Structures are given as structure tokens and as C-alpha cells.
Amino acid sequence: QKEVEQNSGPLSVPEGAIASLNCTYSDRVSQSFFWYRQYSGKSPELIMSIYSNGDKEDGRFTAQLNKASQYVSLLIRDSQPSDSATYLCAVNEGGGSNYKLTFGKGTLLTVNP
Amino acid sequence: NAGVMQNPRHLVRRRGQEARLRCSPMKGHSHVYWYRQLPEEGLKFMVYLQKENIIDESGMPKERFSAEFPKEGPSILRIQQVVRGDSAAYFCASSPGMGGRETQYFGPGTRLLVL
């Protein structure tokens, strides 16, 4: 059973702080990793994708991947109240089923003004 | 609107009725995926389709659920004889189908409530 684990939170940070979201996965052959943001009652919205070890930056967001540790994280700098949402980590299954995404249950982030 | 479209956005059914959920992929996308999100649960893969082909339905319950993606028209997720446990948000995603590293983009979802 392939698993993706996230802290459910809630993670509460003050406005302007750095929010750090973590995710571990069980399938060593996974090759693609994604962070989605989901506002309450809405659909998942892609924030970042990362495929190689190291950091990938996009605006206020930085994704970090460590395949040896089977760990992927998302940093949000200068957090804003509008960043308050559930953040979903998704990992592809790898191998012949590499289209299949396995999602974590998500981390609820609250940014306090 | 070039995004993934789903309808209806909300659907109420009584136990035993049929539910039909429709999904039109993003323009230029030929691959469709259906996911289900139960209350307090993560998104779970159900089925992956290409035009006129079901590629992987391993996440779909064996009974009452079926999916199709015809040559013309939207993809349909059909749930027969709905039960209360089918109440969930059903999301459709699409990807280009160009091979390699594909990113899936999600539609707004259909919230199904079974009374």
C-alpha cells in the first residue's frame, strides 16, 4: 500500500512568517511530486511540481525534495492570510502506474493577521 | 473557460437513484482522471481514461460504479443505486497526454449528497 504522510495540523503562523509543510512517501520509485492548495469547499489547485533532488523556487514558494529520505517539503515565505488553506502533497506511483497520484490527507495552514 | 469543467457542481440523490457526473477536460488534454474525496479523507484515485479507453480502473468500486470517455463529448462517471456512503466530492483532472512528466489539473468538482 503506497502511502503519503502529512501532519494534519492545524499549522498556525503569523502573517509574514515562513510556513513549513512536510510530507513523506513510501514508494521509492516515485518520480514526480506535487503540492496542491485546496481552499475549503474548492478544488485542488496546483502550486508546485518537483522532480529532482534539491530546491525549486517559484515566487514565495519553495519546494524541497530528498529522494534518499523520501521526503518533500513546501516553504511559504512572507505568509499571507490568503495562504490559509489545506495543502495537499501528491506523489505519483512510479513504474507502469506513473499517472496515478497518491495524496496525503493534507495539512491545514492558518495564517493569522 | 479553458479549464477543466465539471457538472453538475452539486447533485442530490435519494438512495437507490443513479448519479451521472460529467467532466470536460482542459482544451488540448486527452487524458482524464477521476478522484473521490470523502469527508475528512484525502483524495483517492478512482479511474484513468483516454478517449474510448479505460486505462486503469483499479481505484473504482467493483459494483455500481462505471466510467467512460467517448470519442465525442465529456467523460462520464456513473454511480448506480447510490448509497449514503457515496456522498463525497468527486473531482475530475486532466493532463495533456504527451507522455513524460504529466501534471494533472483539477476541475471544480461535483459534490454528491445522497439522502
Image (cartoon, rainbow, N blue to C red):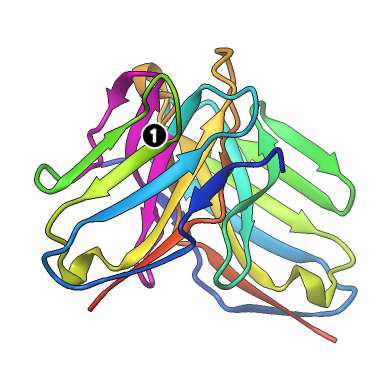
Q: Is residue A21 visible?
A: yes
Quarter residue B56 falls in:
top left
Q: Is residue B115 left or right of residue A72?
A: left
Residue closer to the observer: B49 or A53: B49
Please state the horizontal and vertical placement of residue B110, each as a whole percent of the image. Answer: 44, 59
Asked whether B94 or B42 is in front, the reply is B94
Is residue A47 rendered to the left or right of residue A91?
A: right
- Residue at the image point whose x is 32% and y is 18% from the top: B53
Can residue B85 be found in the magenta stretch? no
| Residue A25 visible from this viewpoint | no
Residues in magenta, as a range: B33-60
The secondary structure making up most of the magenta span is strand
> Dot 1 surroundings within 10 Å: few (below 14), some, or many (20 or more)?
some
Which residue occupies the foreground of this view, B68 or A10? B68
Q: Is residue A28 above or below residue A110?
A: above
- Left of B50 or right of it: where is A33? right
| Observer-nearest of A82 and A74 | A82
Looking at the image, residue B7 lies above or below residue B11: above
Residue type beneath disc 1: Asp
* Element under disc 1: loop
Instruction: Check if residue B39 falls in the magenta segment.
Output: yes
State the residue position of label 1. A27
Determine the residue positioned at 45% across, 30% down: B73
Q: Report the quarter where the N terminus of chain B lies.
A: top right
Percent position (x, y) of residue A24? Answer: 49, 48
Write down the chain letter for disc 1: A
For the C terminus of chain B, the image quarter is bottom left
Residue A94: percent from the left, percent from the top?
A: 42, 24
Q: Residue furthest front?
A: B72
Quadrant assignment, res B112: bottom left
Identified at 56% across, 55% down, the residue is B108
List x then y, in percent, for residue A92.
47, 33
